[in-house]
Amino acid sequence: MAGSKRIDTYANVAAIYVEESVANTFTTAKFAFPFSIMDKMALVIQRIEYTLGGMDQLNSSTDRIVLGLFASSSITSVDDQSDPLMIDNIRIQRLDLGAAATGLIWPNPVIKDFTNLAGGGLLVAPNPLYAGVKATGAAGVTSSWVRLYYTYLELASDEYWQLVESRRIISD
């Protein structure tokens, strides 16, 4: 990336809360980074922290919550790992084992570290960028906090449009 220029030395932090509008429906919240699609800026995400809410709404085996980062608010399936609009996700699923009174303590937040990737993290366009959550089988609404640790990277025009095209975000 000959035209790329790292803007930050230290990581920035952004956090957003997303809650399903109705139980078991995909709902997103848009990050408000100060760049338009024409600014040719990118984020290098070093770390994501997912803090899940509404896990008490998972009442039977196979109930699950999927949440993550998306390049669009109109994805077709949160389970399609090949969708280029899905930047990252986690899936928490209830699995009943043994007696009904069996419990499990789940550590929150779920932390994903990307610093070992080439370039030091996930390269994404800052706009549009969404946090999204969807439960399946939940008795009520689920929610999440998504916290990003990132640095800015200024890209050359051809590099930026290659990034945008790879995520198919031109029309969102």
Image (cartoon, helix red, strand yellow):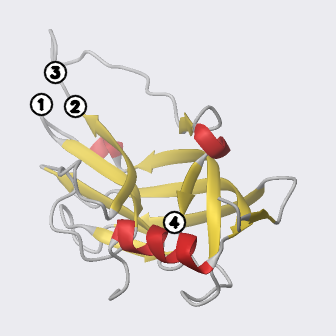
Residue flagged by tag 1: what amino acid is it? Answer: Ser
In the image, residue 65 lies at what x, y percent? 27, 47
Callout 4 amino acid:
Tyr
Looking at the picture, tell me which residue is in the foreground, 27 or 11.
Answer: 11
Q: Earlier in the sequence, mark 3 or mark 4?
A: 4
Residue 73 in view here: yes
Q: Residue at x 57, y 47 (%)?
A: 48
Counting residues from the start of the chain, the first of labels 3 and 1 encountered is 1
Residue 26 in the figure: left or right of residue 157: left
Of mark 4 and mark 1, the one earlier in the sequence is 4
- Residue 28 percent location from the top left of the image: 37, 72
Marker disc for residue 17: 4
Q: Alpha-carbon distance for marks 2 and 3?
A: 6 Å
Depth check: give the residue in front, 159 or 10.
159
Kindly state the secondary structure of the residue where label 3 is placed: loop
What residue is rendered at 62% in x and 69% in y? 42
For the C terminus, the image quarter is bottom left
The quarter of the image holding the N terminus is bottom right
User: Hey, what amino acid is under mark 2?
Assistant: Arg
- Mark 3–mark 1 Cα distance, whole angstroms, equals 5 Å
Q: Which residue is mark 3?
A: 96
Residue under label 1, please give it: 61
Dot label at residue 94: 2
